[in-house]
Amino acid sequence: MPFTTPAGKLELFCRTLSGTAALTQWTGQVWTAWQPAGASPANLAGVPAVVATAGGQAELLASTTAGELDLAWQSRQTGRWHWVTPVAAGTVLRSPAATGWPDGRVRVFAQLGSGTLGILSQLGGTAKARWSGWAAAAGAILGSPAAWVSAAGVPGAAVLAASGAMAAATCQSGRCTALTQLGGRF
């Protein structure tokens, strides 16, 4: 997962074969050696999501083999990664997607255990802030979502809907629209 830090540095994050999180950084000429993202748990699954809070703090979110969502945040002072496990109760399937919203908080989209698209909201602007519980954001999906905030400041997520079609939902004022089909089926 590529990520540009608030300081403008390019980093790549991944889940290793041993199930931990790792990262490398571009120096401008070469990539650094892969290094662990702190004391990462060894049960991560899928691709981690990486996002910056409104305050410029990097956060990594990853699903686990137990169906939980774990969080790591990077100290701006020391550069060290700190893990919080799990972030919220509930089963997560596949890889999450995370984005910062216009209100400065981080939101996470993921496929819930029920097969629907769920959303989780950070209740403050730092990694130490509490999180809401999972809420249903839209209908049944088949894979991992992709999240964004449009140029107009409207957050949304795209997914492969249970119908086999690409679909998207947008969110405003704490509510998400139903999934809207984007085109043909796969």
Image: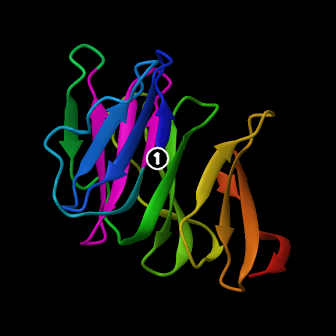
Up the image or down, 80 lies above or below 99; here it is above
Position of residue 15 measured from the top left corner of the image (x, y, whole percent): 31, 55
In this rendering, does residue 178 appear at all?
no
Position of residue 85 measured from the top left corner of the image (x, y, whole percent): 21, 52
Residue at (42% x, 26% y) in the render: 26
- The residue lying furthest to the right in this view is 183
86 horizontally vs 183: left or right: left
10 horizontally vs 42: left or right: right
Position of residue 114 measured from the top left corner of the image (x, y, whole percent): 47, 81
Up the image or down, 164 lies above or below 13; here it is below
Up the image or down, 174 lies above or below 45; here it is above
Q: Quadrant of residue 33?
A: top left
Residue at (51% x, 80% y) in the render: 115
Which quarter of the rendering shows the C terminus? bottom right
Position of residue 42 measured from the top left corner of the image (x, y, whole percent): 16, 59
User: Would you name the residue on which mark 1 appears?
Assistant: 1
The answer to which of 158 and 33 lies nearer the viewer is: 33
Secondary structure under tag 1 reads loop
- The residue lying furthest to the left in this view is 39
- The residue lying furthest to the front in this view is 29
In this rendering, does residue 121 appear at all?
yes
61 in the magenta segment? yes
Range covered by the magenta-colored residues: 49-75
155 horizontally vs 69: left or right: right
104 in the magenta segment? no
Dominant secondary-structure state across the stretch colored magenta: strand
